[in-house]
Image (cartoon, coloured by chain):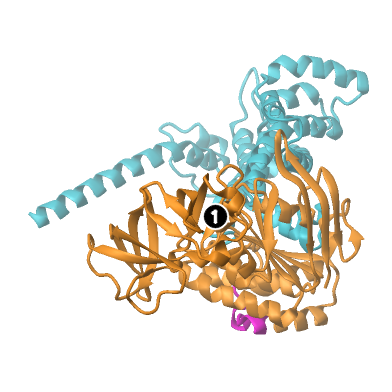
Chain colours: A orange, B cyan
Amino acid sequence: MAEVRISGLHKYYGPVHALKGLDLTVADGEFAVFVGPSGCGKSTLLRTIAGLEEQDGGEIRIGGQVVNDMRPRDRNIAMVFQNYALYPYLTVYDNIAFGLRARKVGEAEIKKRVDDAAGMLGIASLLERFPRQLSGGQRQRVAIGRAIVRQAQLFLFDEPLSNLDAKLRDEMRGEMKRLHRNISTTMIYVTHDQVEAMTLADRIVLLRDGRIEQQGTPLELFERPATGFVASFLGSPSINLIPARLVKRDQAVAVLLESGEVLELPDERARGLEGYTERAVTFGIRPQHLSRAGRGTAPSGSARITATADLIQPTGTRTYVTSRIGGVPVTAELDAHDVHEQGIVLDYAVDMSRCLLIDPATDKVI
Amino acid sequence: MRAAGTRHKRGKLVLRLAVATVVTLIFLFPVYWLFMISFKTPDEIFHVPPLWVPGKIQFSNYWVLFRDGDVVAIWNSLVVAGISSAMAMLLGTFCAYSLARFNTGGENLAMWIISQRMIPPIAVVFPIFLIYVYFGMVDTYAGLILLYTAFNLPYVIWMMRGYIVDIPLELEESALVDGCTRWQTFWRVVFPMARSGLMATAVFTFVFAWNDFLFALILTRTEVITFPVMLTHYFGGQSNFWSKIAAMSVLGTIPIFIAVTLMQRYLVRGISLGAVKG
């Protein structure tokens, strides 16, 4: 159990500045997820915390102790790798016991810990097998088991589920969460998958280009993104971003799309926006905040817009309908039975109270 | 139609087997002949027409080698080849690890090292002889061991670097995080992972030292004569001791048989299957 405190962390790979002065605290017992597009520095950050990469500046504290110059083995951490990193010449039992033997733990204690972990992960019957005799999901459980028995103060996961197929990944995601609840050790988890980030995290740390773009609870980041980048990274299907202008209409502030439609903002949403009128903005609206007008109850403060359904993608529960609005393709998430045929003209209700307005010059949410 | 196709296929197979058998016989015949001579009496060796099999298997040709103490040459070869390969493997594997994992010497050092192996031995044998005379290392175990170690090192480094580079880095990183030092990681992860490569390379270095004639000829006198050099003593101006040549050659071939058998077993790779997704 330990808090991780990082300040002013820099890392270079030759001329590439991979981490640009990161400050970050992961609280004791927290499940933190580092997420971001590839090349954002999330794996580098994790590996630097593990001590597998040396930092070029800044400080890392684990459990109050500065670990800058400590070898990985002295940091009392456990790590699970994307490709499992199981030793092919050892049985499952010996794989799980590997770290304990390296630390000279007694065989009786090893047996107890391995059996406990294997029971928790449902691999007790596989202990005598070799890794090549296991499925992908089983291998990943063994890798997690090897981390659990260490009883380390910090767990690091480097994209542990990305080699699994979709169904297994869903299942293992649930197990990861249960695992954290059971052992409540501080965990840092790296992924590029926003669904994993949203579902697992106590706190998401979204990285972009070697810097922290935003951090907070999953819902904070989803509902109150600081930038257009955060807004478009989280959420599936991703948020619609439509170039527009902010204009004054009568007493109200409204969004004027390039195709000429005017979408009026409700008063409480328009507050504080006076300074932005007559300026270019990016109008952001999530697919689930578009609905078919006249079906069910449209939220108050909704604006209306008409568009043709160009593309219909049913998922069973919801149906994604793509139309051209304001010159760009816009996806709406509708009820499964709302739309059936391509080409029909739809009347959308746009929930303007939930929209985002982004300054295109700075990418900041207004 | 189908029957004709099958017949055609079977005909091809028979032809292929026939050709393979003929080629194998051609290649195996000298080995067979060598073994047969070693069991023949002098009369049988020079018999016209040649005898395909000796009248009876007798070991007097071998017994003579033991009686005269000539077999010490086999022992010398075993000592020199065995110790020098072990040393080359140990040193070379560490060097290879350093090149593979720490990129020691940048991009070109590995290439430069293997290029040392390509020097024609004859170009350096006389300078080495003079140096050895100066240091009193001619006709000593240490002299030959040192030389074969040095000559095998580039090969070991080159081969082992390739094997080590193929080991997934995560296996080592996982061991480092789990509590191993670099040394422990080397022994507990790299060594078992590269085992088949190690064995195969070791066989080759052993064979090189075992078969070397040039250096052994020039750097030995009486004390540490190796088996190839001993063999040349049986070729005389007046006559050749065919029985001794054959018996000694058989003795010298047996370790290589063993080595090749080992190699076959270890060259079958696939031990790394299951380490990572695959």
Residue A121, magenta (yes or no): yes
Looking at this view, name the residue that lies furthest to the front.
Answer: A250
Residue at the spot 66% in from the left edge and 71% down from the top edge: A144
What secondary structure is found at the residue carrying circle 1? strand
Amino acid found under the numbered disc labelled 1: Leu
Return the residue nearer the eye: A213 or A72.
A213
Indicate left or right for A150 with B21 as reference: right
Q: Is residue B244 magenta?
A: no
Q: Residue at x 59, y 68 (%)?
A: A198
* Quarter of the image that includes the C terminus of chain A: bottom right
Closer-to-camera residue (A244/B158):
A244
In the displayed structure image, the side of residue A278 where residue B165 appears, left or right? right
Q: Relative to B7, say whether B18 is above or below.
A: above
Locate residue B9 relative to residue A236 in the image: left or right: left
Q: Residues within 10 Å of mark 1 (few under 14, many from 20)?
A: many
Q: Which residue is mark 1?
A: A357
Range of magenta residues: A118-130
Q: In which chain is the residue bearing label 1?
A: A
The image quadrant that residue A114 belongs to is bottom right
The quarter of the picture where residue B135 lies is top right
Nearest the eye: A301 or A82: A301
Q: Is residue B193 visible?
A: no
Q: Position of residue A269 (x, y in %)?
A: 56, 63
Can you give x and y, in whole percent of width and height, for residue A329 in the image?
37, 53
Image x and y of residue A170, in percent: 52, 73
Residue at image location 65% in from the left, 44% down from the top: B165
Looking at the image, is A43 positioned above or below residue A279? below
Question: In the picture, which quadrant includes the N terminus of chain A?
Answer: bottom right
Residue A177 visible in image = yes
How many marks can you see? 1
Q: Is residue B28 above or below residue B274?
A: above
A76 or A227, nearer to the observer? A227
